[in-house]
Image: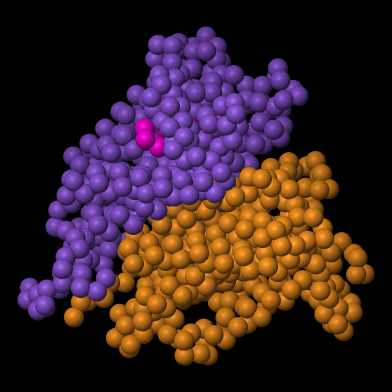
Amino acid sequence: MNDSVLVLTLAGAVITGTPIALAALGALLNERAGILNLGIEGIMLVGAVTAFLGTQATGQPLLGLVAGALAGATLASLHGFLSITMRANQIVSGLALVIFGTGVAIFLGQPVEGQALVPGARLGRTAIPLLEGLPAVGRILFQQDLVVYGSWLLVIAAAFYLTRTRTGLALRAVGESPATADAAGIRVAMVRYTHVALGGALAGLGGAYITTRGAPWDQAATTGGRGWIAIALVVFASWRPLRALAGAYLFGIALRVNFALQAADVRIVPPQFLTMLPYLLTIAVLIVLSATDTRRRLGSPAALGVPYVRDER
Amino acid sequence: MRGWQLEPRRDVQPGVLLVVPVLSVLAALVVGAVFLSAIGLAPVAVYREILRVSYTTGYGIADTLVAASALILTGLAAGIAFRFKLYNIGGEGQLYVGAIAAAGAALWLGEGASPALAIAVVIVAGAAGGMIWVAIPALARAYLNTSEIITSLLLNYVALSLLQYLIFGANTPWRDPNSPTFPRGAPIPAEAVFPRWATTRVHLGLVVAVVAAVLIAVVISRTRWGFHWRIFGDSPEAARYAGISSRQVIVVVLLLSGALAGLAGAGEVAGRAGRLDPNGLVLNLGYNGIIVAALARYNPLAVIPVGVLLGGILNAGPALQSLPGQNVPVAISTTLTGAILIFALAGELFVRYRPTRRPDAPPSDGDPVSVGTGDEGGRA
């Protein structure tokens, strides 16, 4: 039973969904602070290539992951500087990050283009004792790796942080009404910078996970638009971490089924049409969400995308 | 910035408008130099090569202008949308579908048509293809208020898959039947190929692009439609009070934006490649149109020189690769253009605000900075 196609597909879906979950969590923290970061795709690419090179240099996938997260935080801070200090248009600034990040990633990754990490240097599986023995669920959830478990802890921590802590409430205040937060003594720019960097680190980690798990570095395919799907997922998850994780796993399933169909070489549907499906699905979900008019109740941060300029005293 | 404050400028100074992009390009060159040095290349030598292959030789200038023909159109596509705060970032996909439609129309028309008719059909088909591809994001935004940002972007991936299917996936009419082992696009009939200027590769697309830029500039500044768009762009509420249909503005502007990107696709087929050529569309002309538009500050006429500038930089990447004995990564172009945009965005602050010494006493006539909440309309 543990090796049935269904179980293996679901276990694979967790792996495929994890980078999307991490990136979505990063985008969510940005947006809760009122900063729209469209640069996630570029951040993931830089994270992926940095982690690849870091792991290759040190032989330690965990160091590679840290390097990827740090690179993500650095690149995101650039977006923070442009959108917070320089009051730039956040949409254009995010796009600039995607283009610049893609360029930097191709640049850095040129020597290893098309290669994957040697199996010995990849992030290995770490089974959780006892739980791994559960039928089916054990194989799907508890024979994964440290990043998968880490992503659960991060999601739970983020949910707790947003709703149960003082700093989390301060963060939400900044995203909803920066002027009020400012009057209450919250340092708006500081909160925004911190969460932009944190969000970037998470997106970078998401990218880093893809290459340290053993996927080859290929500028066009390594992330393949998952950063954009992650941004859409934040809307789908109505800015809540647990829903983002669930959504990411749903996408993981969709992508895995897709891969399986492509590998099975079903002749009825050409592979190019299967490739389109996740993107079309995302578009459909976004349109249906707005059509059902639940979006207003879903809780988009009110000050999302608006630069804050304090009235000089 | 203690001791300094930012005062909004009443009018944009022409000097600043020129200084900011020039400094952005210079600063980006410095960033590029860091990357080049890191991999052991001499930046000055590489930049001299870029000048040589893109701007100072006749052949190079011609190639730059070919790239510019597409970039001016995609720059206009992004510019007209972004200027009115409609963020169509699907120019890449609209260009692909425009190219597919243009090639399809030319092949369907076949040989024997008069060149004038064939070229007109190709141009109209390209524009229509781009419009079709932007229609879903446009209608969803206008009628359901779905953010057009992500829907338009995700359709880029769909368009890429469609393009690959038509050439690599099956025996479609777009595929060259005479090249079964190396799939490629079928050559379009000679009548539909854009005329070229003398012996260079500069084609009719450049004229189309410049004419489009002038037309857009006139429509925005001189017509009632343009007036409505500007009111909508400044304040959708004001537009509503003035009885302007937001839906109409959103749909018309986005369809126009898609049509311009589609025109660029028609130029790539009928002007540059002579066939639907997925491998030739590697310059990311759609995405780079956004950079062109931002550097031109969404001004249609400024898009023309910026398109030429960026065309050269983008051309330089592949051109440097093909030179023997060179080992310059292709990505130098993307890195440079990305950095230019980042610096231009940072410099935008100085276009909109003037840094002044903070006076000791607070100014009596209100708060100068409180007005400047920016002109961003972010939605998610």
The picture places residue A218, in percent across and down from the top left corner, at 67, 48
Q: Is residue B313 magenta?
A: yes
Of all residues, the one furthest to the left in this rendering is: B364
Looking at the image, which residue is at 83% across and 76% down?
A: A127
Looking at the image, which residue is at 41% across and 21% down?
A: B57
Of all residues, the one furthest to the right in this rendering is: A1
Q: Is residue A286 left or right of residue A213?
A: left
The picture places residue A72, in percent across and down from the top left corner, at 55, 64
Q: Colour of chain B?
A: purple
Q: Is residue A206 magenta?
A: no
In this rendering, is residue A246 above or below B153?
Answer: below
Q: Colour of chain A?
A: orange
User: Could you tell me what secondary structure mostly forms the magenta stretch?
Assistant: helix
The magenta stretch is B308-315
Looking at the image, which residue is at 63% across and 49% down?
A: A109
Q: Is residue B253 left or right of residue B50?
A: left
Which image quarter is the N terminus of chain B in? bottom left
